[in-house]
Image (spheres, grey):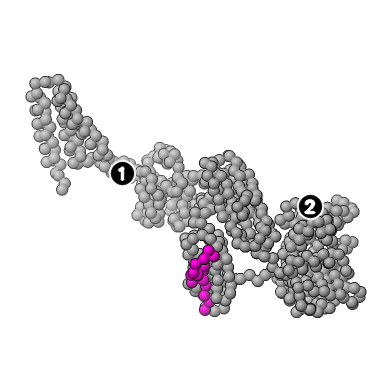
Amino acid sequence: MEIPLPFLLGVAVLLGSWLTWLAVRRPDRRRLAWRLLASWGAVACLVLLLVPPKITRTYNASEVLLLTDGYSPDTLQRLLKSLKPRPQVYGLNLEANAAQPVANLTAFLKQHPEVKTIHVLGHGLPSEEMPASDSLRFVPHLSEIPAGVLAASWPKEVTLGEEVQVQGTFHTASAQETKVFLHASGEARDSAVVKKRAKAFRLRFTPKTAGKFVYTLRWTGVNDSVYQEAVPVEVKASRPLSVLVLSSAPSFEVKFLKNFLSQQGHRVAIRTQVSKGVFQTEVVNLTSTKLDRLTTGLLQKSDAVLLDETALQNLSDAEKQALQQAVRQQGLGMLTTLSQPSFKAIPFFAETVFKPVSQKQPRNGAVRWQGLASSNAVLFLPTRVFQLKEGQQAMVWEQNPRQALAVRYRRGMGQVGVSVLPETFPLVLEGKETLYQQYWATVLNAIAKPAEEPSLAVMPSVPQAHQLLQVSFSANSSSHEVTFQSLKGGDAAPVLVQPSSLLQEQQQGLLWPQETGWYSVLTSNGQEYTTFVQPENSWQTQKLRQQQQAFLKLVKQSAASPDTQSMQVHTDFPLWVIGLFLLVSLSYLWLEEKL
């Protein structure tokens, strides 16, 4: 019940008068003034406790401070001192002293339409909290993001023998250098030193066995804490290829190539011209096949065709036309090796331009290709190299890719390769079988007919636990079923699938993984897709950088500075101050009487 103020003041006057009468009639009149002051002070405190006074403060009604995750208290205090009139402080999904909580920014702005300028402290607004309003002005006061990986890329799948390259940018929170390691199979395989805030890095590792692996990027923070990010890679066994070799004459190059391909499990068919119109044929890992003439059926069964320039010239027009058609329409890959004296462009089969090198005579030199860590591959080099044209890519080169020794370019669905290295078998004679195998694995993988990939995809490409994922695949009917199962074990969970609203032949489903690890997505028609679900708090530095960049983009699109509008806010006077003064007054009255 609220006490009327006149009644309360009347009671207070009577109480104060009674205390004054008691103090005056005392025989000991020492400290009379202090006793009277303490008496009336106690009476005033009692009145103020029953009717608390209000404090009126002037705030900027159109301007607020919004605290987000990672805000700096020093920045907050600096803004409170510099901004006049003082704006109110709010915290977005966080608790902070003297900050009023805000659970949803859009709802807050609807409740406070007078707010036109928002000073954002911390790491910026998350994408789901960015309001769609042209009348707001955002002022960023962003905190520095923590040390970690800003961006990273690596192949999600590699073939056994290929190198895994992890490259990206690392951000350090100070000028102190940081060493980033790539861990695989429990050991540090490669490292890079990062300093000066942000720097690109590249780490490499060649897996020795096939399987699904989770490598890690690791580094040590300033407080000696060890941080890491998962790098999942699926290492697949080499895909067996069907290779057709057309040779104009018996040679050691074809012999060594046949041995290499057969040892790797590839299917090999060789046709060697012995004399005009007479051929010698040989097949490995294949049933008997007629090779006397190139036909559409023969080329359809092949993934790559390797031939030299003379063998190409000896082909009939019908065979050349069949080759071109197989490359364009079926994705067949082919590699033509040009002889040393020729250096002439051949329509479709060798549409290349040559440029001379400094040496006038053929010589031995080191050759390089993608993923080669050393320069020990020494071969007999020609006097001219390829000058790359638009759409051409270097497969093998001398000092750098601009000195290409083997190139490829797309024609229709297939790849056409051209090489000026007629002999690579000397690598085997020198005991460099590994380099020889890497060379041909690189060339064949670059030009071979692509494998049939399942038309199944999971988005986003780097899924995380407790995050909604979308699976999509092509299907001719709506009767397909999809299951989602962790490879750690457990029952397969069915996925609700429905037709896409954009593509009639596309099916879509939603997934919700609850834990990290490898998962398998399997459709009833045999399509399978494996994906790795990252921890929920992974790649935080990258997320914060993307969040800040998106927020700064919003800042550029925000409105101009509006006119300042003031508002008065009434708050209760702190009762603890009144209570403390009351306690001091009563204590003095009690103690003074004892003296």
Q: Position of residue 113 (x, y in %)?
A: 37, 53
In the figure, residue 355 lies in which quadrant? bottom right
Mark 2 neighbour class, 10 Å CA radius: few under 14, some 14 to 19, many 20 or more: some
Residue 568: give its label. 1
* Image quarter (top left, top right, bottom left or bottom right) of the C terminus: top left
Closer to the observer: label 2 or label 1?
2
Q: Is residue 158 visible?
A: no
Q: Earlier in the sequence, mark 2 or mark 1?
A: 2
Q: Is residue 486 magenta?
A: yes
Q: Secondary structure at mark 2?
A: loop
Left or right: 327 in relation to 592: right
Three-letter amino acid code at disc 1? Gln
Residue drawn at 18 percent across, 33 percent down: 42
Residue drawn at 49 percent across, 67 percent down: 490
Observer-nearest of 548 and 238? 238
Left or right: 107 in relation to 541: left
Observer-nearest of 123 and 450? 450
Residue drawn at 25 percent across, 39 percent down: 575
Give the spatial CA distance, label 2 vs label 1. Answer: 79 Å
Q: Position of residue 503 (x, y in %)?
A: 55, 73
Q: Which residues are magenta?
A: 479-495
Left or right: 338 in relation to 488: right
Q: Is residue 161 magenta?
A: no
Mark 1 neighbour class, 10 Å CA radius: few under 14, some 14 to 19, many 20 or more: few
Observer-nearest of 552 and 274? 274
Task: Tell me the residue that label 2 is attached to.
Answer: 376
